[in-house]
Image (cartoon, coloured by chain):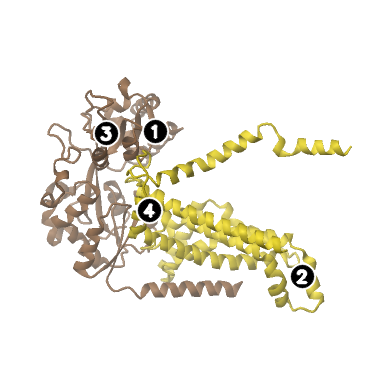
Amino acid sequence: MKSLLKTCVAVAALTWGAGQAWAAGELHIYNWGNYTNPELIEKFEKAYDIKVTLDGYDSNETMLAKVKPGGSGYDIVVPGDYMIAIMIKEGLLLESKPNEMENFENVDPLWTDVYWDPGRNYSVPWQWGTTSFTVNTEAYDGDIDTLAILFDPPEALDGRINMLEDMNDVLNAGLRYLNYPRCNDNKEQLRDLAELLTNAKPHWRTMSYGTIEKLTSGDVDVSQNWNGASMRARLQVPSLKYAYPKEGFTGWMDNVAILADAPNPDNAKLFLNFIMDPENAALISNFARYANGIKGSEEFMDPEMLDAPEIIMPAGAPAPDFVPPCDEDVVAFYNKIWTNLKK
Amino acid sequence: MAEQVLKAGKALDLKYQPGFNIVTFACLVMLYAPIAVLVFFSFNANRSVTLWTEFSLDWYASALANENIRGAAWVSLEVALFATVCSTMIATAAALATTRTRPFSGITAAYMTINLPLMVPEIVTGIATLAFFALMGNVLGFTFGEANLMIAHTVFCIPFAYLPIRARLENMDLTLEQAAADLYATPWRIFRRVTLPLLMPGIIAGAMLAFIVSLDDLIITILVARPGQTTLPIFILGQIRRGVTPEVNAVSTILLGVSVLFVTLFFLIRRHDKGRG
């Protein structure tokens, strides 16, 4: 048995050795699955003669669990706004000073002084979007720009609603409908929130992330949704409309950052600078269908994105609400409400 | 009298309990209907995985042409093959040591240790393995790199390979090995010429189980995988958030086909062996 183990280890070591032999110019990117334009990667590889590997994750939390112990081998991660704040606090990100890079001047000033990375010392914008909901106007042709569609739906939409299976998205929408502040630890207001959600639940059909499938198959007529997903669904079913509720809606941004223990920090910095070039930022958007926060990238974007009502917000819409990470006790309350709701 | 016994036997036999057919049917539907739906929509011409339009093989073509899917499939196979070979060898040795020796003190402890991965929740094994490899890298500055994943898979595949092999050993007629020993065969010769051939069906069953379990694993893999080691399950999970296309159905159907092929082969080999015996 010992010698068998030895054989296994020897084979493993050999495989490892073979892997190392490739290391000339490398860059290891860990991004959300199906989110990175392969053309962008090819262009970067050719421009700098760097071999890129790309792996996907399905949530900020999976990514955090994996890189937190250190030595994950990745150079670049693409966390959401609140996750950048958490990772900076925990010392997981390299202070790579993107604000001193050549292409930083292209970043829209709207995105340079953000709560999760004031002044942009750690991260650069990847894509940003909004989380609201999509309505099939063939099923309901009234005013859709109100959260009442989700929490007190008109009869035509009763039982035809999909909510995201995401605690923060559902709870924050409820807090906005009640006109209560986010990251709330007021017990009475939280009781109201729990009551609102419990009463609304019978009107909902499902809770799922598969929004495009649900809407295009006609399984539901309303779904909480991301703006880019809503656009892709509309290209299949033209009667789908993205709502900008007057009570407000969530804004989010995914950001490219370098890990503190990145094996190839210099190549990673090249990549950060590379994606702040408008032409390259447009490649990102053309693939995943979200805005990128780089000035001048519109010029290189697909024409169908430039007049998409999901991407270009109407003049009267409220500003997207970027919700910072809440305190631990608030999260504990939220968890309780969420667990109860999902019973 | 004999008739009564027969009747009593019939009454106790599970197959004659009321509702047996309905329960069986319900179980089969619950098990296989989702798979049938998945296979069905892999032939859909539409982009949707829920709305049927017309028959097409386009998604198979695009899945096979998709470099990411091919890469992920390759990683999965590489890891599964390595884990299968290593875990089956170790499991065979362990099965022999726990059945073909005089009972030693600590045999229960050994048995428990071997089967521990079956009982510990996968997420615990995953986090522990991740932390272990990270610690090894941080403190000793030593890492197996991409072999981390193969070692982790080998470890959790061992009990799956071990159980069928041990079961086979326990059912094997010990007198054959004793007879060989009586005829002055050396222990190695007994193992090569008597034990191993008789044990082969158990080893093949164990290896196949290990292979499928490794191919299937998500939680440990997602935590332990190194850059570039996206396996098929990780790839498929990554697609869900941004919209699944029937490409994923096509890949799953191909995987299903491979599994069915394996099981059929195993079944045929066994029947062939039995027929010869």
Is residue A92 shown above or below B188? above
Q: Where is residue B273 shown, x and y percent of the image? A: 67, 63
Q: Kindly state the secondary structure of the residue where label 2 is placed.
A: helix
Q: Where is residue B246 shown, x and y percent of the image? A: 37, 47
Q: Are the residues tagged 1 and 2 within 8 Å (C-beta)?
A: no
Task: Give the residue number, with chain letter if any, for mark 1.
Answer: A206
Q: What separation in Å lies between label 2 and label 4 (alpha carbons)?
A: 51 Å
Dot 1: within a 10 Å radius of its alpha carbon, few (fewer than 14), some, or many (20 or more) residues?
some
- Label 3 amino acid? Thr
Chain identifier for the yellow-coloured part of the image: B
Task: Give the residue number, with chain letter if any, for mark 2.
Answer: B177
Task: Give the residue number, with chain letter if any, for mark 4.
Answer: B60
Q: Which chain carries label 4?
A: B
Of the 4 image quadrants, the one containing the N terminus of chain B is top right
> Residue at the location (58% across, 65% down)?
B88
Q: What separation in Å lies between label 4 and label 1 (alpha carbons)?
A: 30 Å
Front: mark 4 or 1: 4
Residue B110 seen by the camera: no
Q: Where is residue A148 shown, x and y percent of the image? A: 28, 25
